[in-house]
Structures are given as C-alpha cells and as structure tokens.
Amino acid sequence: MWYGHWVSRRRLLGRATSLIASGILWLLLFLVLPGVVLVVVAFMSRDADGQIVWSATTENFRRLLGFGILGWSADNGWIFLRSLWVAGVTTLVAVGLAYPTAFFIAASSPRLRYVWLSLVVVPMCTNLVVRTYAWELLLSPQLPPSMFAAWLGLIEPGRALYPNPGAVYVGLASTALPFAVLPLYTNVERLDWAIVEAAEDLYASRTRVFFQAILPQTLPGLSVAVILTFVPACGMFVITDRLGGSNFWLVGNLIQQQFGPSRDIPYGSAVCIVLIVLTLLGLYLYRRRGKAIELV
C-alpha cells in the first residue's frame, strides 16, 4: 500500500514538474539570463570602435557616480532624481484620474461598461511612437490647444506646446492611464458597499468614508496601478525625447543614448543595473508601507 502511495506521489510530482518546466525555462532564458549578461557586461570596458573589451573594470560605475576625465559632475545624479520625480508625478496624475474613471465605469450599465473599458484599452493596442507623434500633432501651433495657450499669453503666437516638461507629463500620464484604470476598476467593481453604507450611517464625513471604507478595499488594485505606472515611467525615452527635447533627459534617454549613437554598451548596462536596483528598492519600500497601512 505504501508503495502505491509513493508511486502515485512520484507520478504527481513528475506531472507538476513537466507543467512548470516550460515556464521556468522561459523565465531563465528571457529574464534571468539577460540579467546575468547585463551584470557581466557592466563590468567590462570598450575600445575606440565601441566594441566590448573583456577586461574587468569598475570605471563604468565611477562614471555613473559622476567621476570623469574632467573631474566630478552631478549631471547623472540630476538625471536620476529628475526621473524619479517625473515618474512620481506621472503616477500621482494617472492614479488620480484613474480613481474617478474606475468608479464611473463601474457605475455604468453592463452594456456601456464594456464600451468604456474598450475605449480605455484601445490606446494600449497602438504603438507608443504613433501615440507620441499624435500628441505632437495635437500640440502643434495650428491646433486649438496651442492657439488657446497663445491667447492666454502662456506661449508666443505660432509656437507649439512642446518641447517642455508639461508636454512630457501629458504624454506620460496618458500612456500610464490605462494601466492604472484596469486594476482599480477590478477592485471597485467588487467593492463591498455595505461597509461604505455603514460608515455613512455612523455619520462619517466623505473624506473619512473614502479613507476608511473605500481606500482599504481598493489597496490591492492601487498597488498594482502604482507599480504598472511608476516602473515604466522611470525608463521612458520616446515621449521625453519627442515632447521634452534634448534638455529634458531621463534615465531612459541616457540608456538609449549608450546603446544607440554613443555605442557604450558597458556603461549603458551599468545604468540599467542601477535603475533596476533603485526600482526594486522603491517597490520594496512601497510594499512595506502598504503592509503597514493594511495593519492600521
């Protein structure tokens, strides 16, 4: 009897292993292996032609800290700080717009609900470059937004509303909005309104109802929305390059430049590693903060 139990257990383990083997292999090939290669290349150097020289060095990380031929510079530090700031503002704007949008969609009739969700998802089916060029067209001097801004005296007549930081925030927030709406909508649709009604029956203000009855129930969706908006915004380069101009560099632009015209792949790999570490650290701190709020 024990032999038959051991055979059936071994057979189940074999089936489970065969089922997850493809997933594990996929992660190893397309996530772990590229990460290992990135770490190795970051400690290499390059020759005058931009080819990788397989000799270990820490010069790439020294350059990243600002130490160069002409001495120390704070340019990279400002680029990282600007990237975190822009990603944070983008996340706040996207989540702030996603909350009422999610409630509006959830309160609609079932037929209209699918229409609104389709309108939210449709931009995700379009290439990011195409959407960025569309924003360039919308902010061009010949269209009403620029003409209205010129009438208000915000810009000179005949000028576009880009390149400037405001156009970058608009482009990033519009790109991140669908990724914030969908997870929040999932939570709002399953909201326990009995808890909200109980808070209102106890004469809680609208602010307390939101923070004590609604927000705790939507925290899982809020966490996903923050991650899906903050992480991509840190590494964006197409939107900042087209709508921000050459004077509004973020980390994504710095990385793109190293793998593009500059062809300094080891230095670009070092920047990628630092960005990944900072992103994981931010997510860890945010997760700890989220658990602390749940406990309260």
Image (tube, helix red, strand yellow):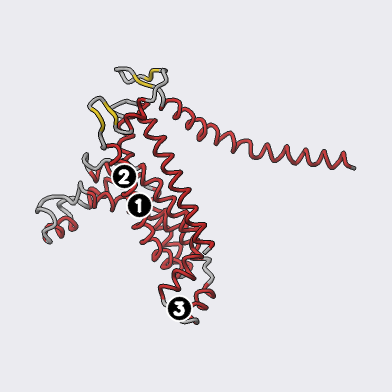
> If you read the primary sequence from the N terminus, does the residue marked by circle 1 or circle 3 appear first?
1
Are the residues tagged 3 and 2 within 8 Å (C-beta)?
Answer: no
Q: Nearer the viewer, residue 115 or 244?
A: 244
The answer to whether residue 270 is left or right of residue 148 is right
Q: Is residue 219 left or right of residue 86?
A: right
Q: Amino acid at mark 3?
A: Ala
Furthest residue toward left: 157
Q: CA distance from mark 1 to mark 3?
A: 31 Å
Question: Which residue lies at the image location 82% right of the left edge and 38% below the top edge?
Answer: 7
- Residue 87: horizontal and vertical position, in percent? 34, 49
Which residue position is annotated with label 3?
Answer: 204
**Circle 1 Cα neighbour tier, 10 Å, few/some/many (<14 / 14–19 / ≥20):** some
Q: Nearer the viewer, residue 128 or 280?
A: 280
Give the residue number, with chain letter if any, for mark 1: 88
Residue 174 in the image, given as x and y percentages of width and height = 33, 53
Nearer the observer, 112 or 265: 265
Residue extending farthest front: 71
Mark nearer the N terminus (3 vs 2): 2
Q: Is residue 164 left or right of residue 278?
A: left
- Which-is-in-front pick, marks 2 and 1? 2
The dot on residue 81 is: 2
Q: Is residue 215 above or below residue 7?
A: below
